[in-house]
Image (tube, helix red, strand yellow):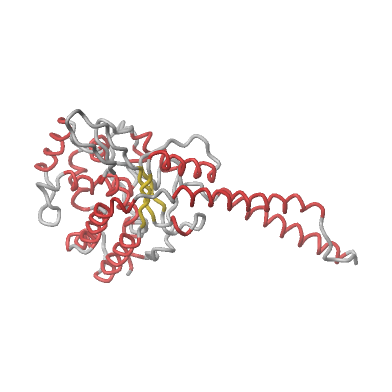
Amino acid sequence: MEKLKTPLPDSEQSTQTIENNKEEIVEIPVTPETAPSVSEISVREQIMSKLDKVKNDEQRQGEIITDTSQKVEDLRRGLGMDTGSEIPSIEGNKQKVRLLEEERIELEKQLKTVLSADVSENYADVIKEVKESKIDWANSEELGRRLKLKGATDEDVTQVREWLVGNATNAKTFVLPSSKFSEVVDVLNQMTGEDNLKQGEAFHVPGGRTDVPEHIKSSVFMQEKPALPPLPGQEISKPTIDSGILHHEYGHVTQDGLLQSELYKDYNPKIKEGAPDAAYVGDITETDTRIRSIFNNLKDVFDPKKEKFTETQLSLLKKKRDSGTLSRDVIDLLDHYDDEQIIELANTMPAI
């Protein structure tokens, strides 16, 4: 277990720091016609990054109250005065705590109300397919080979498999109509104290966060695409979700903890000079889920469990890009890495 000095936590204890505009809430594969820019997508990473604002404010006020109370009590004892009476100077802090508690409770009520509009049961088959694909990959010999390239032992591989399968199995999915998805973003804006967060198409909440309600931990939030107006003579279409986006978000939820372990402490691929968003796309979690998007884009002609990724597959991706059928995720990789680096990453990364 030498390489896993930073142990992989269980699904309810993992932590994942979300850095400003970068870490943990998604870059998303979408059709070229609707693909947002990389900068717009990266802003979504903020949505959960400061969810602890209200909680931290409460904690800070509580610390002030405790510290002030202790100092005043010690001073009173030293002067031979009565202790235990009210301290006027901290009444304002207590009032702030009460207001913060009320604010947090109200925001959690709003969140629960919005989530009552969840329609994920309508997409049970798609969600099941995505979960099973992550579990199948976690149990594959190919993933074991990739982990051992980083120095993992057989015991490490077994631990990682169990960890990934548990994450994928226990992850929850919330699918919300567009208006309700916007309300979720609004509530989270209030929780974070930010008012300039842009609305994305999906995001995920790591399982180890202690500052969100239990029922949204280890979860993926998806925006449902409304049905398009039918053309004359055609049947009425139904609302949909983008399975590519779901795969991407489940990649983040499934790997949560692995890529932050000692196995990947030396991650440092070479990024093209002038790449549009090197810090974001170059982040290990964002690059890894995009490698998986490569395989998903080539699922009809390529199986990474059976063959190596080569220039032949890379050429197919470039043809898809030229024809406008390549996902945003993979376009990002082509924009940020040269051919040699992409081939190396495609054959060595966990690709969750």
Report x, y in % for residue 81.
90, 65
Q: Nearer the viewer, residue 288 or 25?
A: 25
Q: In this view of the protein, which residue sits in the foreground, 287 or 62?
A: 62
**For residue 231, side relative to residue 120 (left or right):** left
Q: Residue furthest top?
A: 232
Tell me what residue is drawn at x 72 percent, y 57 percent. Answer: 65
Q: Quadrant of the C terminus?
A: bottom left
Above or below 324: residue 174: below
Residue furthest right as drawn = 80
Which residue is at 45% across, 45% downward? Answer: 19
User: Residue furthest toward the bottom?
Assistant: 155
The picture places residue 291, in percent across and down from the top left corner, at 23, 47
* Residue 181 or residue 205, whichever sits in front: 181
- Image height check: is 288 above or below 15? above
Quadrant location of residue 73? Answer: bottom right
User: Relative to the observer, which residue lies in front, 304 or 339?
Assistant: 304
Q: Position of residue 158 (x, y in %)?
A: 26, 69
The reply, left or right, for residue 104 in relation to residue 40 is right
Residue found 53% across the figure and 39% down from its top = 194
Tell me the quarter of the image containing the N terminus: bottom left
Give the mark count: 0
The location of residue 338, given as percent across then percent down, is 21, 38
